[in-house]
Image (cartoon, rainbow, N blue to C red):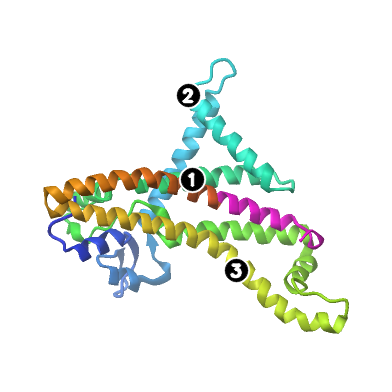
Amino acid sequence: MADQALTAGQYIKHHLQNMTYGQHTDGSWGLAHTAEEAKEMGFMSINVDTMLWSIILGVFFLWIFRRAAKNATADTPSGLQNFIEMIIEFIDTSVKSAFNGRNAIVAPMALTIFVWVFLINFMDLIPVDWLPGVAGWIGSSIFGMDPHHIYFKVVPSTDPNATFGMALAVFILYMYYSVKIKGIKGFAGELTLHPFSSSNMIVQILFIPINFMLEFVALIAKPLSLSLRLYGNMFAGEMIFILIAIMYGGGWALGIFGGFLQLGWAIFHILIITLQAYIFMTLTIVYMDLAYQVPEEH
């Protein structure tokens, strides 16, 4: 339930602020108590809540799949084994339909991305005040901190640092395999000899700056499209949940109406979080396939 000690604007800002650790202006290190302090910490700061939940959910993903693998049987498979096998078959089909090269890491990477991003997105379905409320209670009861200065976001994909980090990892792999498969000369030619080409050498040289600008924009768009699509959709979904939560502080009638809105949006949001995980995975597979395409295949 929305904290009555905060105005609606303050409540929204509080829920959109990460728990940031970094260096204060006086040289000391610690958690930021305000959004302004977090901004002043600069590039070397770290969003503790984003890292915490990303790691926890990553470990949970590894644990649940390891457990299913250890208990796998061909006789009477458990429900968990059937569910895991269904996911693996789905990923395997997606990779085979979109990736034409031969690379042993593509399928495991696609599986990791899909499940991990889904779990990260799934945190958006937890009521917005539950876990931040627990964090505020721990901070005030044990450490004597002001709960209004304790920030705790639980959806890592609403933090652009997380989505850009994942997209950057995919982009680095794309660049690595592009150079490995095509060679430096082939990759450079891909950036400078397409889309405009000519049999006339002079004309082709004149086209190189134009081609490079067009292809460079398309190249940079790959990590941007991956990160911003996931971040934008999840941030919008989180904002709607926060706005609905504010309604609980407007009386019982508005609270009941907000409860129905929250249920409806949560049901619809299940589709969104699954779709965003699938899109991130599919684009990753497509980008890896592009890395394996030689120029004459374009």
Res. 12 image quadrant = bottom left
Q: Earlier in the sequence, mark 3 or mark 2?
A: 2
Separation of disc 3 and disc 1 at Cα? 24 Å
Judge left or right: residue 219 versus residue 235: right
Q: Is residue 259 magenta?
A: no
Q: Is residue 26 above or below residue 21?
A: below
Q: Which residues are magenta?
A: 281-298
Residue 188: x %, y % from top left: 75, 70
Instruction: Give the label, 1 or 2, closer to the camera.
Output: 2
Q: Amino acid at mark 3?
A: Ile
Separation of disc 1 and disc 2 at Cα? 20 Å
Mark 2 burial class by Cα count in 10 Å: few <14, some 14-19, many 20+:
few
Q: Quadrant of the C terminus?
A: bottom right
Q: Amino acid at mark 1?
A: Trp
Q: Residue at x 79, y 66 (%)?
A: 186
Q: Which mark is residue 220?
A: 3
Judge left or right: residue 183 versus residue 64: right
Q: Residue at label 1?
A: 116
Judge left or right: residue 135 versus residue 45: left
Q: Residue at label 2?
A: 79
Q: Is residue 35 above or below residue 119?
A: below
